[in-house]
Image (cartoon, rainbow, N blue to C red):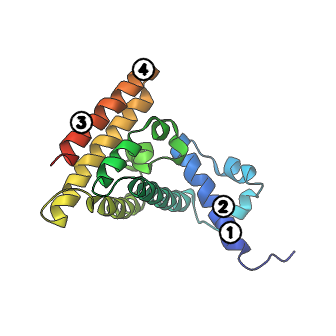
Amino acid sequence: MRYPAGHKQETREQIVRTASRRFRKKGAEGVAINDLMRELQLTHGGFYRHFGSKQQLFIAALQKAFEDGLVFLRQATEHAPKGKELNGIIQRYLSTEHCLNVENGCPMAALSTEVGRQPKSVRLAFDRSMGAFVSRVARFVPGKSMKKRKLKAHVLFSGMVGAISMARAVSDPKLREEILKSSREMYIQAFCNN
């Protein structure tokens, strides 16, 4: 059976998109290739037409997750008043919606601890994607130089990733909201009121 032009690329993108959500929701070890391909109504053998290993898929899925994160950032800044873009990013990142939506959320919050245990090739891909993400945010961070703004953006996201991780870990919805609210207030005061 002949497939139309572009079919292979569309299938690959479908695999990456679905894997990206699954990895964020279930972690690297929580995703089995057989299950992923079955969900997509594709064969296990078909996976190897697109990827040499699960590790290669994980790298592609991480890159896709960071691309989604850039869309998330753009939406947060577009809906913020001029000069309040960073405030908008913090509000949206530390929102209940983002907290409860792990599979479509930030890969740093969903996968940082796992990436640290992955082979160097995965960590390097994470570094590159995170660097591009932080550079985008740094444009809105106060500071005298881009280098200083990037350092502040790293600090900001380190804290927000931790806040989201803690909020996701607790079982009490009231405590979750308190963590998110107090973190939003603190990061807005620390980074936006200069």
Q: Upstream in the sequence, badge 3 or badge 2?
A: 2
Which quadrant of the figure has residue 85?
Answer: bottom left
Front residue of this view, candidates 189 and 132: 189
Q: Are marks 1 and 2 in contact (CB under 8 Å)?
A: yes
Front residue of this view, candidates 15 and 93: 93
Residue at image x 39%, y 21%?
175
Residue that badge 1 annotates: 10
Report, in whole angstroms, how far the alpha carbon at label 1 lies from the one at label 4.
Answer: 42 Å
Disc 1 element: helix
Which mark is drawn over residue 14? 2
Q: Give x and y (percent) for residue 138.
A: 26, 60
Q: Give x and y (percent) for residue 117.
A: 39, 47
Q: Upstream in the sequence, badge 1 or badge 3?
A: 1
Disc 3 element: helix
Which quadrant of the figure has residue 185?
Answer: top left
Mark 2 against mark 4, which lies toward the viewer?
4
The reply to whether residue 75 is visible in this rendering is: yes
Looking at this view, name the residue that lies furthest to the right.
1
Left or right: 131 with respect to 189?
Answer: right
Q: If the image is split into quadrants, where does the N terminus sit?
A: bottom right
Decide: few, some or many residues near mark 4? Use Cα within 10 Å; few <14, some 14-19, many ≥20.
Answer: few
Decide: few, some or many residues near mark 3? Use Cα within 10 Å; few <14, some 14-19, many ≥20.
Answer: few
Mark 1 against mark 3, which lies toward the viewer?
3
Front residue of this view, candidates 129 and 116: 129
Report, in whole angstroms, how far the alpha carbon at label 1 lies from the one at label 2.
Answer: 6 Å
Mark 3 against mark 2, which lies toward the viewer?
3
Left or right: 129 with respect to 138?
Answer: right
In this rendering, the answer to whether 131 lies above or below 28 is: below
Report, in whole angstroms, how far the alpha carbon at label 2 lies from the one at label 4.
Answer: 37 Å
Residue at image x 45%, y 19%?
172
Which mark is drawn over residue 174? 4
